[in-house]
Amino acid sequence: MTQNVGLNQAQMDFLRLLAHFTTEEEVKELNDVVCKYYAQKIDEEMDRLWEEGKWTDEMIEETLHEHLRTPYNA
């Protein structure tokens, strides 16, 4: 069970920002900006891992063929 500890300062600031949005379109645009931000962060981290040799072509191939589905017994 998780404990609810309230919102941190960054979360409160974000909620205050959302108060200025009045349309669904504005919220969608903000969502797109946030998604692009995190996509950029992921790209930067993957580049760092690649440069450090912690991510390779072989690892990509292994990931492509990895079976991640949970087996269910009928």
Image (spheres, rainbow, N blue to C red):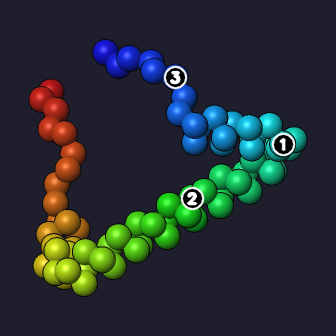
Q: Amino acid at mark 2?
A: Cys
Residue 61 visible, this orientation: no
Q: Residue tagged by mark 1? A: 20
Query: Regarding mark 2 in the picture, which secondary structure is present there?
Result: helix
Q: Residue tagged by mark 2? A: 35
Query: Regarding mark 1 in the picture, which secondary structure is present there?
Result: loop
Q: Nearer the viewer, residue 72 or 33?
A: 33
- In this image, 26 relative to 39: left or right? right
Residue 43 visible, this orientation: yes
Q: Amino acid at mark 3?
A: Gly
Tell me, for residue 6, which label it has, or none.
3
Q: Quadrant of residue 69?
A: top left
In this picture, is 22 found above or below 57? above
The 10 Å Cα crowd at callout 3, few under 14, some 14 to 19, many 20 or more, is few
Q: Position of residue 32 (x, y in %)?
A: 65, 59
Q: Amino acid at mark 1?
A: His
Mark 1 to mark 3 CA distance (whole Å): 22 Å
- In this image, 20 relative to 6: left or right? right
In this picture, is 29 found above or below 8? below
Q: Quadrant of residue 7?
A: top right
Mark 2 to mark 1 CA distance (whole Å): 19 Å
